[in-house]
Image (cartoon, rainbow, N blue to C red):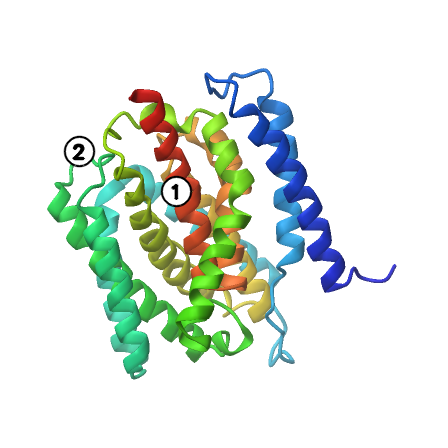
Amino acid sequence: MKAMSDKGRRYLFIVLWAIASIFLGWQLARPPYSFDSPLSVPNLIVMFLCTVALLIWIPNPIRDAPAEKPARDGLFAVLIFTSVGVLFLARNVVGSVLMFALPVIGTLTLAILKRPVEKRAGLYASALALAAGVTGLGAGWITTFFTPVVWSILQVFLVLTGLLAGWSILYSAGLYQQGVGTSRFLSDGATAAFKSFMIGLAIALPWAFLNVLLGASNGETWVREWWQPVIALQPGIAEEAWGRILLVPLLFLIFRRVSGPRAAFGTALYVVAYWFAYLHTPGGMNGIASAAILGTLYALPVSYLCLYRDLETAIGWHFWVDFLKFVFAFILFN
């Protein structure tokens, strides 16, 4: 059977996106919102189909070069299971302290690669880091371990080192040149970057609706002022920088030693996506089921957008999902 064309994949996504947006949007007029709603199962099914359509629409662009040596499938499997075990163990043992290690890892990566940082990339990464830091001062969901100032400063270093180190890895591996982890701003300028951001907002619509319907707003009791939903820009920027642009290429460096670049990167993306989803659960064995749902319906779509489309689309997508959650929290609690 002939593979579906690019236009066909795009139309498939648009149709399912429209169905999901209408079906989920209609339910927003019927609070209260809860995961225990009778419509939760149909909602999850509709969103799963929409997610699959998105992943089909934006495929892995990496081309495998002729192998210098055969892939070692057995060792590849061992590395996958080992990395999964280490990452999930780190979540439960180290916890939030792990966040402080990431800027150090990013800095060491830059020092090891010794690849000069382009001035424009450095300035852009600095601007995004500053935006994440400033908005991070208002992150009302941070109630333990971090103070707002510490959290804000941490965001600056996470974004700056995450973007620069991640881009350096992708350039050195020849993946950035194939369209992996690209920035629309760096390639096409501010207007194109803003357009990608707006496209990200549009794509995110059904995911943002589902997030509210599943009760995500119910725990955001800190949202008391009309301007606070804008703080969604902080996770929208920072989590794409360290959670996608940095961590996936780092894990790719390990996997590519025993597999081709396409399989190595794709596997790294999936491992990090589900681990990232696990970070948003209470942890332990009880968090695995939630991580499976969050990873499939949220972490994978934004990972594909960030790494297989462009950074700005992913920031827009991520921002809108959190922004709408905070908007409904403001409505519910005021």
Q: How would you rate the neighbour count of disc 1 (Cα within 10 Å): few for under 14, some for 14-19, many for 20 or more?
A: many
Q: Three-letter amino acid code at disc 2?
A: Thr
Mark 2 — residue? 144
Gap in Å between the C-alphas at discs 1 and 2?
21 Å
Front residue of 310/278: it is: 310
Q: From where the camera sits, is residue 130 visible?
A: yes
- Residue 316's label in the rendered image is none
Q: Residue at x 34, y 55 (%)?
A: 237
Label 1 with label 2: CB-CB less than 8 Å: no
Q: Secondary structure at mark 1?
A: helix
Q: Quadrant of residue 46?
A: top right
Q: Mark 2: which secondary structure?
A: loop
> Counting other residues with Cα less than 10 Å from the Cα at mark 2, is it few (<14), some (14-19), or many (20 or more)?
few
Which residue lies under the disc numbered 1? Answer: 88
- In primary-sequence order, the first of circles 1 and 2 is 1
Residue 171 in picture, x, y percent from top left: 43, 78
Position in image of residue 325 (x %, y %): 39, 34
Residue 82 is at least partly visible in this image = no
Q: Residue furthest right?
A: 1
The residue shown at (32%, 75%) is: 121
In the image, 80 versus 147, the foreground residue is 147
Q: Quadrant location of the N terminus?
A: bottom right
x and y, in percent, of residue 211 in the image = 47, 33
Residue 123 or residue 287, whichever sits in front? 123
| Amino acid at the residue labelled 1 | Phe
Residue 84 lies left or right of residue 331; in this view the side is right
